[in-house]
Amino acid sequence: MRGVSLDDEGPLARLMAGGRHVRLLVMGRLPAAMSLPPLKDFERVARVGPGSVIVDPLRLPFTEALFDKALVATLLPPGTARGELREQWRVLAPAGLLLLVVKARRRWQWRRPGWRREALEPVLDDAMFEVLDWQVATLPERYHLILLAKRDGLRPAMIGRAEASEVPATAN
């Protein structure tokens, strides 16, 4: 079983890379084997969760687009998953990055809390996030480590019905 650190080229290392003018949100209780680097290189760091300020994940007490990056460890209950993710989307700046850490489960573990990738992908898409990197790590339990980018929400929409038609040949 391996832990996750910045030595890897994985999602955590990609999230923590960057300059000094970056605002970071750390939310939730990270798995014990997941170690964070010193956070002194960030302009601002907000810690939310056990051992610090506890907030409602559906109503974060931050203004819109405040954070450039976020590291969120959550159970992500299916009933509130979309709301929690949309609230994370709200507090991220344009082009913001989110590293989501959620428990993973296998197909036959239907009684265990956690997510299978097939079930989580449409929830992330609906919350307007684009997947940049996805790993499953053993910390010692299985977790999804998903690096997400904030989408702007502007998707092309088909209005009405379009039918193919032949263009008449022009005579030259």
Image: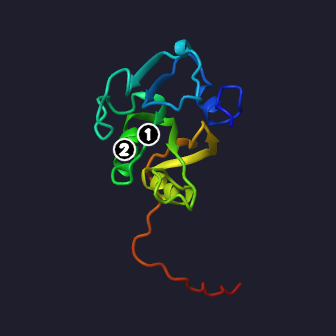
Q: Which residue is mark 2?
A: 84
Q: Give the vertical position of 22 relative to 91 (above or below).
A: above
Give the residue type at disc 1: Thr
Nearer-N-terminus badge (1/2): 1
Give the residue type at disc 2: Glu
Q: Nearer the viewer, residue 65 or 154?
A: 65
Tell me the number on the disc at residue 74: 1
Of helix, strand and loop, which one carries label 1? loop
Q: Nearer the viewer, residue 97 or 84?
A: 84
What colouring does the structure picture have? rainbow
Q: Residue at x 47, y 60 (%)?
A: 156
- The answer to whether marks 1 and 2 mark residues whose Cβ atoms lie closer than 8 Å is yes
Q: Is residue 8 left or right of residue 67?
A: right
The x, y position of residue 58, in whole percent, is 30, 41
The x, y position of residue 79, in whole percent, is 34, 54
Q: Residue at x 43, y 34 (%)?
A: 92
The x, y position of residue 109, in whole percent, is 53, 58
Q: Give the vertical position of 99 relative to 81 (above or below).
A: above
